[in-house]
Image (cartoon, rainbow, N blue to C red):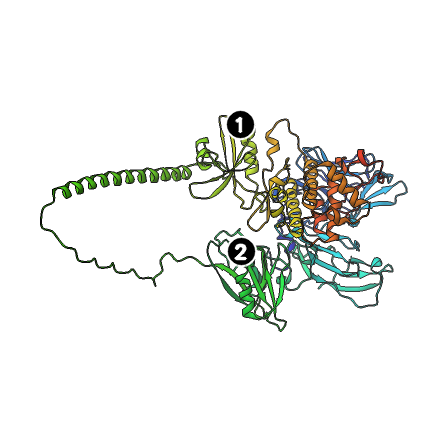
């Protein structure tokens, strides 16, 4: 991930995942209305000169998912190196029965036939489009009768800029979504006219600086020249800032600027002699300075050869895929010291800063149960930067003066060697009688017999209990496991691990414990479900793994019994905290916002990150569980498909998510009148904070509240076709996508009081 140069083709999204050699190109000057591209037919639209082509691409990380993209098509570039430069809808994917069409009404649409929905469109039905054209510069354009461009892909970039393509203010390049962190990287131009590389929406780790006058930022744009220069230019094409590729004076046929999945911005040139792409400039010279470059799997260090790589000096788990740091102490902790190391939190990317001494910084973190790590800057500022998240990263370098402390569990000692066994006290002298006592003998014999019987019964009971435990453990050890690694348990075992359904923790949900003492939650699917359908759904959801989705460990499918065995999540469901006045105070404003963002990401993963589209089907606060760090996990996803009559799409999940957001914001139960009151109070311009849960003790960010209310009511639109996708919802919540005020979601009730503009649309993933 950290190797420099040619990173473009070490990315799983770009290296050999586009198998174009079997495609059937169709070179056309203009693409007429009604033209279609099909996944199954592998057909292409090719630019007049043959340098670029557009068609479906198969993603290796999601074998049954396809994107619609533009890529290089020149014969001088081998097929595996023909890089994709634009993707419709950024990270939107579809199934293998899908198609891309220029409709008769002038819209380009990407249709997922399996789901029966349009997942992306240009929204150009009212612009009198008569044809499309893929130009020789890689720009897909829509033309009207006067051959004027009314829409173009250059205005809606994904992760790449081509020569001649402008990046305007508030437009964004976003790294491809290929791992747990890459989709959070973005490049945009701020209101001051500076290019900025960002992690999520608020961590800036690189900026372009220029001091030439003060041109209006609205007139600036970033452009990559054909000569290999990245510039900020004004409306007269006069450069205000420039950086040069190493080969900017050389004759190069193909260039591009790309935001790679490791978060670095690089300029690439095609080298004919080596038939490869070469990195000729990168924004962040030291890859370790890219925020979260190692994600949650370690910190960035330089190896013996001087190359940066991810290592984990404090790793406590053997699995290479587990996160580097995992604190789950059952006893005390100690603090390990790491010199020349700077750490920072990434989920969330914030920390508390205190001015103190080195030793006091260590003690503050050790005494604070919420603190996981701390960094003392040791550069004269005396800053102690404390982290409370278990997700942190950082970098290590001999030139760094900072010292970091990481909390570590102190293993308990089985035997204290300093405690010595005391000598038994000497018995006082006893007068011994040498006479024979018959009654004493009879009493002693009787007592001995009774004691013998009691001991035998005790031993028998102990052996019985021990044997039962061994049998239970043996039963678990020899439990059948399906191909997805799920336990297949008989109903008798379900009764056993739940104590005959003794501890109910929710509707149809029981707490249990496996013989190895692992706690689990057992869900009783009361309704009879056809066996084949049930096993198919279990196999489907059992293969889904995401840190914010509750893991399915096993199931029972026996006669009329249908049970699911989930991992147990400690702090219970969100609805418990909303309904209880005392518990609700633990859900601070920040935690509520984090819950919204995290749940949105989890649902977005179900919709677009799995092998096939999966709808939750029953998203609500009772299905959002909080772990010991109050990080949410979504449970009971994908169960709607076990019922043949159910037909759940992404639109229902979006609506349910909007309802959940309003419950978290207002603290009110799901009552439609309450939603209408919330909308009226907010949209009429009164104090928006009046809709916030009164039990919250301050801390409400009004700009954040405005953003949350806007997207929540977009999610609740009665016209499901104008609801946003979950991918758009995530971007709005992250602050990387702006959103207009929504029309009244309850139009049949509010139409007399509100008059929304016709044709209102939700945010688009390709619009700012």
Give neighbour class at mark 2: few <14, some 14-19, many 20+ (Cα, 10 Å): many
- State the quadrant of the N terminus: bottom right
State the separation of the CA atoms marked 2 and 1: 40 Å
Above or below, 538 against 767 in this view is above
Q: In the structure shown, which secondary structural element does the residue marked by tag 1 occupy? A: helix
Horizontal side of 388 relative to 174 (left or right) equals left
Q: Residue furthest left?
A: 435
Q: Residue at x 65, y 50 (%)?
A: 594
The numbered mark at residue 324 is: 2
Horizontal side of 219 relative to 521 (left or right) equals right
Q: Nearer the viewer, residue 596 or 49?
A: 596
Above or below, 27 against 291 in this view is above
Above or below, 507 against 268 in this view is above
Q: Residue under circle 1?
A: 531
Residue 632's x, y, as percent? 60, 46
Q: Is residue 240 visible?
A: yes
Residue 498's x, y, as percent? 47, 36
Q: Residue furthest right?
A: 146
Above or below, 384 against 180 in this view is below
Residue 119's x, y, as percent? 72, 39
Pointers 2 and 1 in contact (C-beta within 8 Å): no
Q: Along the polypeptide, which appears first: circle 2 or circle 1?
A: 2
Residue 314's x, y, as percent? 51, 60
Horizontal side of 430 relative to 675 (left or right) equals left
* Corner quadrant of residue 147: top right
Q: Nearer the viewer, residue 124 or 515?
A: 515
Q: Is residue 304 visible?
A: no
């Amino acid at each position: 991930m950290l190797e420099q140069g040619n990173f473009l083709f070490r990315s799983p999204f770009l290296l050999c995942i586009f198998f174009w050699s079997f495609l059937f190109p169709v070179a056309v000057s203009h693409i007429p209305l009604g033209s279609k591209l099909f996944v199954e037919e592998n057909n292409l639209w090719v630019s007049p000169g043959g340098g670029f082509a557009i068609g479906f691409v198969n993603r290796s990380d999601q074998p049954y998912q396809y994107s619609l993209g533009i890529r290089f098509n020149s014969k001088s570039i081998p097929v595996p190196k023909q890089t994709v430069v634009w993707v419709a809808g950024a990270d939107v994917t579809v199934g293998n029965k899908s198609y891309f069409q220029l409709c008769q009404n002038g819209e380009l649409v990407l249709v997922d036939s399996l789901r029966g929905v349009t997942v992306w469109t240009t929204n150009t039905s009212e612009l009198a489009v008569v044809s499309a054209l893929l130009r020789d510069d890689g720009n897909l354009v829509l033309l009207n009768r006067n051959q004027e461009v009314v829409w173009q892909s250059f205005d809606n970039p994904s992760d790449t800029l081509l020569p001649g393509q402008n990046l305007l203010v508030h437009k964004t390049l976003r790294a491809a979504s290929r791992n747990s962190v890459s989709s959070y990287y973005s490049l945009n131009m701020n209101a001051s006219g500076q290019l900025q590389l960002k992690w999520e929406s608020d961590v800036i780790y690189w900026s372009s600086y220029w001091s030439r006058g003060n041109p209006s930022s609205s007139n600036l744009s970033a452009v990559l020249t054909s000569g290999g220069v990245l510039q900020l230019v004004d409306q007269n094409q006069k450069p205000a800032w420039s950086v040069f590729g190493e080969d900017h004076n050389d004759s190069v046929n193909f260039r591009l600027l790309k935001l790679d999945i490791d978060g670095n911005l690089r300029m690439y040139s095609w080298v004919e002699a080596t038939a490869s792409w070469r990195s000729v400039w990168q924004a962040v010279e030291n890859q370790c300075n890219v925020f979260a470059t190692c994600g949650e799997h370690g910190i960035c260090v330089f190896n013996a050869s001087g190359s940066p790589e991810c290592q984990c000096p404090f790793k406590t788990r053997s699995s290479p895929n587990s996160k580097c740091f995992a604190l789950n102490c059952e006893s005390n902790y100690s603090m390990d010291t790491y010199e020349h190391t700077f750490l920072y939190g990434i989920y969330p990317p914030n920390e508390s800063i205190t001015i103190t001494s080195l030793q006091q910084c260590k003690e503050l973190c050790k005494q604070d149960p919420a603190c996981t790590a701390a960094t003392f800057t040791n550069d004269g500022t005396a800053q102690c930067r404390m982290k409370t998240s278990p997700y942190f990263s950082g970098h290590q370098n001999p030139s760094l003066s900072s010292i970091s402390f990481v909390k570590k569990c102190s293993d308990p000692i089985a035997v204290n060697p300093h405690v010595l066994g005391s000598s038994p006290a000497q018995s006082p002298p006893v007068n011994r009688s040498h006479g024979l006592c018959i009654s004493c003998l009879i009493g002693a014999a009787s007592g001995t017999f009774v004691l013998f019987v009691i001991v035998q019964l005790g031993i028998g009971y102990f052996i019985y209990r021990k044997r039962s435990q061994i049998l239970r453990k043996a039963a678990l050890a020899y439990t059948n496991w399906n191909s997805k690694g799920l336990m297949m348990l008989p109903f008798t075992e379900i009764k056993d691990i739940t104590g005959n359904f003794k501890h109910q923790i929710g509707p149809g949900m029981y707490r249990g414990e496996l013989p190895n003492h692992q706690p689990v939650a057992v869900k009783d699917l009361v309704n009879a479900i056809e066996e084949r359908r049930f096993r198919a759904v279990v196999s489907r959801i059992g293969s889904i793994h995401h840190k914010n989705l509750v893991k399915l460990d096993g199931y029972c499918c026996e006669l009329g019994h249908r049970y699911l065995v989930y991992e147990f999540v400690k702090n219970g469901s969100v609805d418990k905290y909303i309904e209880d006045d005392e518990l609700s105070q633990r859900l601070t404003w920040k935690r509520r916002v984090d819950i919204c963002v995290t749940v949105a990401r989890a649902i977005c993963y179900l919709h677009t990150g799995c092998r096939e589209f999966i709808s939750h089907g029953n998203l609500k606060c009772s299905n959002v569980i909080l772990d010991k760090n109050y990080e949410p996990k979504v449970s009971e996803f994908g169960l709607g498909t076990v019922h043949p009559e159910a037909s759940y799409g992404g639109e229902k999940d979006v609506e349910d998510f909007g309802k959940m957001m309003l419950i978290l914001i207002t603290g009110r139960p799901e009552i439609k009148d309450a939603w209408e009151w919330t909308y009226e109070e907010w949209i009429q311009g009164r104090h928006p904070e009046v809709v916030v849960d009164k039990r919250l003790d301050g801390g409400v960010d009004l700009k954040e509240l405005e953003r949350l209310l806007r997207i929540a009511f977009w999610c609740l639109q009665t016209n499901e076709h104008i609801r946003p996708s979950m991918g758009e919802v995530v971007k709005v919540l992250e602050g990387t996508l702006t959103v207009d005020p929504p029309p009244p979601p309850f139009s049949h009730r509010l139409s007399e009081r509100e008059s929304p503009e016709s044709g209102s649309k939700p945010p688009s993933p390709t619009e700012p």
